[in-house]
Image (cartoon, helix red, strand yellow):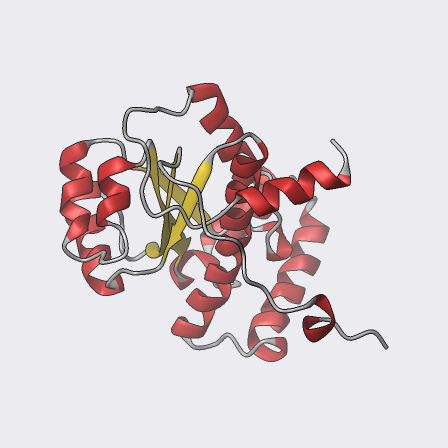
Amino acid sequence: MNKQEILDAFQFRHACKEFDSSKIIPIEDFEFILETAQLSPSSFGFEPWHFIIVQEKKLRELLKENAWGAPKKLDTASHFVIGLTMKPTLTKWNSDYIQNFMKNVQQLPDEMIKGKGKFYEEFQKSDYDLTDDRKLFDWASKQCYIALANMMTSAALIGIDSCPIEGLQQKEIDEILKKDFGVDNNKYGVSYMVAFGYRVAGPKPKTRRNLNEIVTWK
């Protein structure tokens, strides 16, 4: 794949407002999209995310009332994803999740776990001032948006449309996720939704500022 093909994919990608409900993404293509989320980078490599793929119609219906940016996508998208972010219960420097992650996922020796853990503690307490729970959740949510961007880009590269959605009532959706999806609200909160499928109409031409307006070389 050359540079022009990659740029063509970025031109192809747009916030698709309505999908062709008769077209379903092949499972191998959607698994590819999910794998690009899995391989996405995150601060300290701690992967503070979880993704719920909502395919059941009755569950999609439950989301509509409190997700004002999603109804048409919920009705027509081939695949609909809820992006969850870990809460401080999991992401705080001294949580069991962080300690277990360094040991069992990153497979670090004890001495490195101790050093990295101390560095992560200082990062939260001093560098980024993440001692407030809301700040820590928002910081973790930023990591989840990296995975979102990668999913949308990888979809565009293989001709699949997407639409990121923040038009939702966060507290209400969290309650629905707890009641009807079995999500532990002490551990996870919603950051965004994203729909995938195939467009029914082409997008308008992209409007962007000139590159020299957004980039400064020194």
Q: Residue at horizontal 40%, vertical 72%?
A: 133
Q: Where is residue 6 in the image (x, y as percent from the top left)?
A: 68, 40
Is residue 112 placed above or below 88 in the rendered structure? above
Is residue 174 placed above or below 7 in the rendered structure? below
Apparent side of residue 146 relative to residue 60 in the rendered image (left or right):
right
Q: Nearer the viewer, residue 38 or 2?
A: 2
Q: Nearer the viewer, residue 74 or 50?
A: 74
Where does the C terminus fall, quadrant-wise?
A: bottom right
Q: Position of residue 96 (x, y in %)?
A: 46, 52
Q: Residue at horizontal 63%, vertical 77%?
A: 127
Is residue 147 placed above or below 141 in the rendered structure? above
Q: Position of residue 209 (x, y in %)?
A: 62, 69
Apparent side of residue 215 relative to residue 128 in the rendered image (left or right):
right
Q: Position of residue 12 (x, y in %)?
A: 55, 42
The reply to whether residue 48 is visible in this rendering is yes
Q: Residue at horizontal 59%, vertical 35%?
A: 157
Where does the N terminus fall, quadrant-wise?
A: top right
Q: Residue at horizontal 42%, vertical 65%?
A: 137
